[in-house]
Amino acid sequence: MIQYSNLSSVMKPQDHFKNGESPIISGSILRKIVLVLLTVVFVFVGCDKGNNQETSNEEFCLYLNSENLDKTIPIINDYLAGLKDNLNDEQKLQEFTKWLKSHSCVIDATILCVSCIETFPAQSEISVSFKENEITVIAVFDILMSNPLKAVRICSINFVE
């Protein structure tokens, strides 16, 4: 059994530091540590953005088939949400078709009409063609002309041999 009869011989925290130094980190050292940590966080967040874009491209092509076509809508909406506000509706749709054509899995993308579906807000139509099992598939997306633009549905899918 341990006896605690002589507690006065136990060292006090201040006894561990020479010349009265405090165990608390000085402000300048703490600031340096915080700056280093923030720099590391910004580097990793900044580098991760490119990987997300690449993943979205791969994911878009993975879902660009007749069975999973609806899974492309959230990816499309992520892109549309990032379009510049200073573009008019037709310019936004042109940028969108350029983005679609930049995917290796897309054969063609065409603006069929701008604000031609009379809803509130109006809707436009974009056709996207791609290959599936040696057959060309043409899907028509309805795009809500809101701010930001938003893909709301696939209104038709046609198969062309």
Image (cartoon, grey):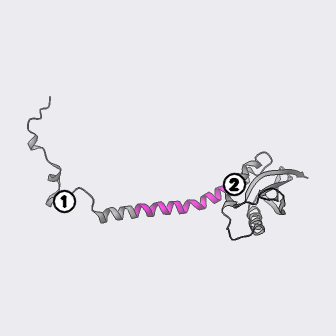
Q: Amino acid at mark 2?
A: Ile
Query: Helix or strand or loop: what does disc 2 sit on?
Result: helix
The quarter of the displayed image where residue 93 is located: bottom right
Q: Position of residue 12 (x, y in %)?
A: 15, 48
Query: Helix or strand or loop: what does disc 1 sit on?
Result: loop
Q: Amino acid at mark 1?
A: Glu
Label 2: which residue?
75
Magenta span: 36-59
Q: Position of residue 67 (x, y in %)?
A: 78, 45
State the residue at coordinates (58%, 61%): 49
Q: Position of residue 151 (x, y in %)?
A: 75, 55
| Magenta region includes residue 96 | no
Look at the magenta stretch and give its main secondary structure: helix
Question: In terms of depth relative to the viewer, which is nearer, 77 or 62?
Answer: 77
Q: Which quarter of the rendered picture does the N terminus lie within?
A: top left
Left or right of 14: which side holds 103? right
Of callouts 1 and 2, the N-terminal one: 1
Label 1: which residue?
21
